[in-house]
Image (cartoon, rainbow, N blue to C red):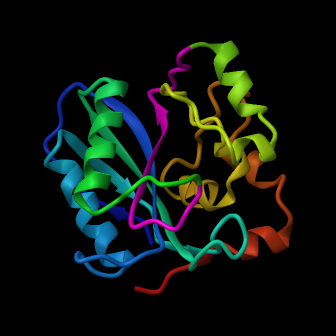
Amino acid sequence: MVLQLENQRSEQYESIIAFGSNLSSDFGASAELIDRALGALSRNGLFKVVVSGFYQTPAFPAESGPDFINGVVRVETSLSAEELLAVLHGVEAEFGRTRNKRWEARVLDLDLIDFGGQIAPDLGVHEHWRRLPLIDQMKQAPEQLILPHPRVQDRPFVLVPLRDVAPNWVHPVTGVSVTDMLAQFSADALAEIRPYAR
């Protein structure tokens, strides 16, 4: 079920943020921790428009940790993309996120998926990271903000909740809709993205 949230708004950019957690912390189990982290966004200049349902999904790579609780929030903000990314990293740290290696189990993950349809830093850099083979993705991470998120089309655990909050979203680079991106996955892959009963 999609939760509608009302906040005071002004002229702002609409952005999409994916969230996930598969470790507990002093702030509680994953679902409770995410609720608190989403509350922290509003204190940092982000106004929640729509929050997706929560979904339980297997960790990636397989057997790399407990199942994740994943979802997506659509927000409006007057911050720049770089300022927004800094806020997301700050909230992650506030809730106990550490960064030791790629794709490890984690207390909180906040990924900026889209920022007003912008492509950053440019099309060539985006294409490089979007087409990077999986084996290289596991070893490399960009040192700059890439928009839209270069792996969104590969992640059904992001696309399913993204469809909840932005069913008409179209990838700014490829022009492919979220519905068509999801259609590229098998029924078995999509069945792994299970609604999380709260």
**Which residue does the image show at 29% across and 63% down from the upper left?**
96
The range drawn in magenta is 103-121
Residue 89 coordinates in the image, percent (x, y): 33, 44
Q: Is residue 26 left or right of residue 31?
A: left
Q: Is residue 53 magenta?
A: no
**Which residue does the image show at 78% across and 32% down from the upper left?**
131
Q: Quadrant of residue 127?
A: top right
Above or below 99: residue 157: below
Q: Is residue 107 magenta?
A: yes
**Which residue does the image show at 82% across and 58% down from the upper left?**
185
Q: Residue furthest bottom?
A: 197
Q: Is residue 6 left or right of residue 100?
A: left
Q: Quadrant of residue 150?
A: top right
Q: Tell me the chief SS of the magenta region.
A: loop
**Quadrant location, the C terminus:** bottom left
Residue 174 coordinates in the image, percent (x, y): 73, 28
Q: Is residue 146 left or right of residue 48?
A: right
Above or below 21: residue 44: above
Residue 119 coordinates in the image, percent (x, y): 56, 20
Residue 169 coordinates in the image, percent (x, y): 58, 40
Above or below 21: residue 46: above
